[in-house]
Image (cartoon, coloured by chain):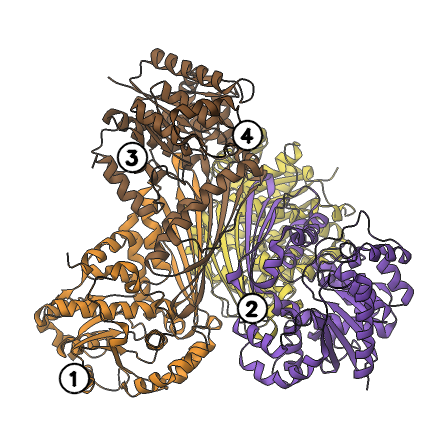
Chain colours: A purple, B yellow, C orange, D brown
């Protein structure tokens, strides 16, 4: 029997906790794998690890027990309260596997890489996992203070020497993962996968990487609907959006420096599908009273035959953790498959899952889906 | 030079008038073919007739001059008022080619078939058109009073003998078209193409037919978004819809007998994509003050991971004539291609254009698009 | 010390259970009286009974224990689950005071009146309450099968002789309440208070009555916004509405016979404020997956200066039980005040709380509020 | 016969042009005074000047002929195109009365005051108007560069000496108006009426002033709905808003310096009605393709009984010029009444018309309406 290790950076956050609660609940037969793409019919034939065989570990700067985090999330409506009792024992076991790590700034980036690599080796040995996937679920980081990203692997040292502004948390996590022989997924809009040097390192080490920024709400809808306008030959003039976010992510994104990473990753979808002439103001507001919930409003102004102006409005009211967590499980399984197959470098075939996919300019949901299906089939 | 005749049943209605104004404006270089699917890049290689080569004729129970109808539509915001002046001369010419025909009930169905066939032959001769496409744009008809639809061509006589309740206006138009050697498109939710006898007649005569009920608004969105939920493995529990329609179509659809045809054709999309367990109340209201405009509101309740309930709301504010008219031009060009190729019977490959496509159970926008692309390529 | 009895018809339903849970939580200091109008500053001076002094009893056709009902409601998100533990003991005491009564049809209306009057006397004696208020919270009833409502008290016998179609459940409850010397509130769109005979009986007995149909969502918004359009002199052409209801009330209202009572009571608001020329289609749909939640969408089409058409859309996502329950406590306190003052007959001054107020044609929120303030002041 | 002069600053802008087109259309019997508050029933008894007796003049930095501006607005859907023909002659007359004035910066503020005062005297003499009302309809100005506003009339000189950053265009217009013996209305969020010195000057001269920032859309709805939540004792936690503006005003407000005046004036409404704890992010986006149209989306998160969270969403799609223009006519008539009565200083009784009313902290629509009614009655 082979088991697959899944190491979550930000392992006590909302998404990570929900992913672990969910995996435990599915394994216990207490929940169905809804929201998991790889649990749908088309993926039956792929050699994907059963959810039960995923062995979780991780790291976080906070040390709140996972059961307590689960109770908080249940109270916030992310999942039913009785589920916490069902998975309580499993969570307690996982609690010991999520290490407390220093915050960025409390140590040097290079020290952080070494410590994380060490933790990954220890986890692999202790849990006897054959393959390892690291998923970055940490808070949105500020943009890297690069004039240009490090191009070759040998340029990485310079970034690390420049301190945390250049060696951002996602870069640290990516390098540590690759040095430890693990696949790496950036589920945040981190800088790591925008650095050619990181992709080059993955190639060198023969490891797959995928990212970035999980596509779960407003951008998901844009990537579905924008191709409809394009194929129906209906010119879109403006696509305005407002995102109201509660909880921790909202507070982080209310800081303009952090928001800029997110807004940049959100903007590319419409531009690649509809061209550069669409006016697309987008806002992210922190509205703490919304808790774990997120509301996105979009207003699309388009014209039909003979210039007639028309409108489409969308309101999406979603729980980001409940949307993101099953995709984390999907990506763990898919990167595990890539490791099995020896796929290396940026996995463009997984762009379906991301707002700003690495290795491809395709942002349309339907073409990404075709690409994913071919990727899974190994075609 | 070969020209293609396009015969519009309901030729002075909003959609038909907009189609003819638009074709004239495009031919005159006064408008771009926005909203026309066949004017987008992917269709460059197909042997489609230029819009300029489409020769319009038609029939209607009313005789309002087309210029006057165009002015009314411009006042209602369907297209800019100055455009009417640009195409006025062309409309006056067309005016003579749109025959005034008796309303259903003022004659027998068989007499109506004979008269229409005669008109089609006369039009073909007068305008010297090689191929002919008949498009049904008449008002939504009440469901046919059939226990079961006529199966074989020889069963059609029985329907005609039973009078207008069985030989509905769409059936009359379809039979007349086929008997006159024309392709037939039902852009309404008429009964004609639900009758196997009509499809059999098309096969016998070697003629193509396509339909039914042009997909321009709420159902278009459903066919785009429902597959997203399916592929993301997000169970949809309810999808409620309300449609506010002004103008003539609204009044017609406020009559429950006529609405039932439309509601039935709208309902199948979600069922085929999401399965039978989705609660889907749909309403059509006549709101005369909305004029040529239509507003559709949809509320989707779905669950994500671990049963978390979430919502998507949509509001679509569209001008149906401006959305439908370019599709009428598309279908004229595509059926002309089918005639050129000798395609016969129900054209499942054109399901992309219809709420309730004939010859296929595929209601998903993206799979329909792939099918259309193959159909156009003759593959 | 004087205590006030509050008898809830439909005492194990969602609204009644929430009212009792809330009153217990407020009394225990575990919740603030949010949503209660009489708990806001303007009501300090009125001689209103403290919430702690309200003594609940009631009747229902089902016998589910209140604690179990409370747990179901908490699971449906109506209030936080931990609150049930806080009020569990109090609910158990109340459980014995909510009688199980036969369903309409299992007995004659006259027998039902006698049984209920007997129960009210027994409750009053057992709990030693000085004044008694009966609040009808039963499911929406079908319209009474009257050609015209009973006018004089002596006409009531004829209704009772005609069986349950004429002596509807609300009529039975109202007569029993008045015969037992209690005030009566119809929080549903029941027929009772449309019968002049019932108002006459209240006058004769010197008892106050108020109703009907608590104003908690869509109609609340209409009564607030319609006067804005009127005062800004902006003509409203149409005001369309769709209501999606989950749970028990939705199922009941999916039955057209029951819906007709509700729709009629909803329609009058706009007509009295904006005049008879507003097109106002309204739908109520049962969408079981929405549980205790209700979503109302409204689309208002109005014109400004020089006929320019504009739109306002509203989406209200509310929990009806959480909106209605505090108003039930308000009405219990206010009717108790009316009993103290010897007010008799229809209390037009309480129209603020109702969709279809008895004794007045005023449906505007702001004028109703002024009237309420005067009523409370005894002016 | 006495006539009333109305001097429009920004006299060729969208609002001013619409006001003059509308007044001419109403005078010609070609339009009804819809949207004019003073044309509704409650104002019959007031001694208000007939719309026909209003004599328009004004000033603008551009010199586009009014007929051309009217044609542009008609093309943008602000009013029907045929109306322009009806009022063309009247507009041509008005064209001569709207002076071209230098832009701020091309002259000194004191010179601008002198020139405007001179123009006002000339207008009054030429048109033989007894009373004069100046209405500021210029573009939103940047906030004044004051540490504190000028307090006493003698402080004004210091502001003027400091140049255009301190003597903003609204201040120039207000001082010129008052020096010329005219009433002054600031329909924009200009700085003038925030300066105690301006109010003091109005008192000294015995002239009325009113403002500021006409309440026509999102803030109108807030001022109507927020009191509903307050009176129903429903705590509001957040009220988020996004405003999409086309055309000139949108471009101006896309400049953060100008937007800050507008956003500040929008924010006070909720704070005064609901208290300081409401999270209220508000955005203004320039979306040029929306032309003369404005779309505002609001999302309100509130709680009911026992802390149950609920939502209200609003989408307002309005044409600002068509909403603002009739209020300009209202204010001209009402200030004329104030001049007749000798009212002096800030007219708090007119707060009903403004986002940020001068002389009062009352932002609630309904209490403002009562105040207005008393003001008109002279009570």
Which of D327 and C166 lies nearest the eye of the viewer? Answer: D327
The residue positioned 24% from the left and 25% from the top of the image is D340
Q: Nearer the viewer, mark 3 or mark 4?
A: 3
* Residues behind callouts 4 and 2 on a single chain: yes
Spatial distance from mark 3 to mark 2, Cα to Cα? 49 Å
Looking at the rendering, which quadrant does residue A130 occupy?
bottom right
Q: Residues within 10 Å of mark 1 (few under 14, many from 20)?
A: some
Which of C25 and A239 lies nearest the eye of the viewer? Answer: C25
**Residue topped by disc 4:** B82
Looking at the rendering, which quadrant does residue B236 occupy?
bottom right
The secondary structure type at the circle numbered 2 is: strand
Q: Please identify the quadrant where the N terminus of chain A is shown.
A: bottom right
Question: D128 above or below A16?
Answer: above
Q: Measured from the top left, where is residue A331 in percent x and y?
A: 74, 70
**Residue topped by disc 1:** C121
Question: A327 above or below C377?
Answer: below
Left/right of residue A61 with respect to residue D166 in the rendered view: right
The secondary structure type at the circle numbered 1 is: helix
Residue A347 seen in the current view = no
Pointer 2 and pointer 1: residues touching (CB < 8 Å)? Answer: no
Spatial distance from mark 3 to mark 1, Cα to Cα? 58 Å
Pointer 3 and pointer 4: residues touching (CB < 8 Å)? Answer: no
Tell me the subunit letter for badge 1. Answer: C
Q: Residues within 10 Å of mark 3 (few under 14, many from 20)?
A: many
Left/right of residue A176 with respect to residue C379 in the rendered view: right
What label does residue D39 carry, if any? 3
Tell me the subunit letter for badge 3. Answer: D
Pointer 4 and pointer 1: residues touching (CB < 8 Å)? Answer: no
The secondary structure type at the circle numbered 3 is: helix
**Residue topped by disc 2:** B302
Left/right of residue A171 with respect to residue B194 in the rendered view: right
The residue positioned 38% from the left and 49% from the top of the image is D272
């Amino acid at each position: 029997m082979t088991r697959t290790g899944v190491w979550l950076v930000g392992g006590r956050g909302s998404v990570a906790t929900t992913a672990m609660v969910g995996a435990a609940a599915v394994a216990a037969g207490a929940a169905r794998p809804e929201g998991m793409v790889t649990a749908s019919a088309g993926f039956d034939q792929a050699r994907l690890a059963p959810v039960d065989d995923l062995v979780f570990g991780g790291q976080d700067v906070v040390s709140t027990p996972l059961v307590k985090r689960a109770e908080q999330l249940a109270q916030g409506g992310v999942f039913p309260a009785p589920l916490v009792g069902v998975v309580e024992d499993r969570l307690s076991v996982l609690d010991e596997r999520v290490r407390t790590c220093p915050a960025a700034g409390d140590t040097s980036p290079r020290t952080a890489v070494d410590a994380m690599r060490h933790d990954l080796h220890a986890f692999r040995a202790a849990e006897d996992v054959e393959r390892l996937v690291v998923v970055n679920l940490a808070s949105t980081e500020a943009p890297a203070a690069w004039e240009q990203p490090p191009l070759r692997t040998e340029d990485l040292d310079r970034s690390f020497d420049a301190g945390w502004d250049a060696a951002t948390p996602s870069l640290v996590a990516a390098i540590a993962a690759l040095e430890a022989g693990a696949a790496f997924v950036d589920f945040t809009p981190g800088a790591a996968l925008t650095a050619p040097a990181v992709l080059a390192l993955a190639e060198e080490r023969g490891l797959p990487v995928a990212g970035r920024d999980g596509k779960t709400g407003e951008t998901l809808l844009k990537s579905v609907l924008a191709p409809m306008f394009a194929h129906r030959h209906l010119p879109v003039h403006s696509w305005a959006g407002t995102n109201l976010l509660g909880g921790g992510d909202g507070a982080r994104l209310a800081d303009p420096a952090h928001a800029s990473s997110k807004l940049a990753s959100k903007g590319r979808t419409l531009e690649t599908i509809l061209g550069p002439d669409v006016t697309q103001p987008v806002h992210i507001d922190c509205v703490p009273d919304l808790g774990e919930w997120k509301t996105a409003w979009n207003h699309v102004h388009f014209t039909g035959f003979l210039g007639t102006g028309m409108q489409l409005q969308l309101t999406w009211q979603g729980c980001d953790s409940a949307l993101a967590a099953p995709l984390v499980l999907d990506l763990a399984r898919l990167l595990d498959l890539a490791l099995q197959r020896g796929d290396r470098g940026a996995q463009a075939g997984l762009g379906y899952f991301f707002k700003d996919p690495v290795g491809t300019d395709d942002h349309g949901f339907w073409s990404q889906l075709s690409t994913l299906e071919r990727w899974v089939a190994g075609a």
